[in-house]
Amino acid sequence: MLQVNVEEHDTEIIRLMQAALAGEDVLLARSGKPLVRLTPLVDTLHRTTGYKTLAVTREEIDAAFCANADAEVAELFFGRDSKPL
């Protein structure tokens, strides 16, 4: 992989990098033909996934399921006369 540090005087590339970091789709082209796309790297140490990215609470998620969901799942796994653990 080739890595190049950008100097402060490279104002055009810095402007393009800032646009990409702001979420803008940046394509570099030659003779009108797109060749390269600038995309920001995702910081995996600070990325949030799963439940914490939802805009709902755990209680709202639990309430969305029917009251006998545990019994229905247990029946699927263990048969009709089973009870939830």
Image (spheres, rainbow, N blue to C red):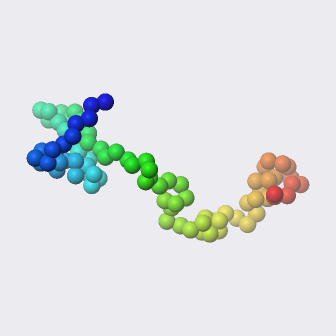
Q: Nearer the viewer, residue 10 or 18?
A: 10
37, above or below 53, in the image? above
Marks counted in the figure total 0
Quarter occupied by residue 2: top left
In the rendering, at what x and y percent does residue 8 appear?
14, 48
In the rendering, at what x and y percent does residue 60 appear?
60, 69
Residue at the image position 25 percent from the left and 49 percent from the top: 20
The N terminus, quarter of image: top left
Quarter occupied by residue 81: bottom right
Residue at the image position 81 percent from the left and 52 percent from the top: 75
In the rendering, at what x and y percent does residue 85 appear?
81, 57
In the rendering, at what x and y percent does residue 11 appear?
12, 48
Residue at the image position 19 percent from the left and 38 percent from the top: 28
Q: Is residue 12 visible?
A: no
Residue at the image position 85 percent from the left and 49 percent from the top: 79
Left of 74 or right of it: where is 61?
left
Q: Nearer the viewer, residue 43 or 65?
A: 43
36, above or below 50, in the image? above
Left of 42 or right of it: where is 51?
right
Q: Is residue 18 visible?
A: yes
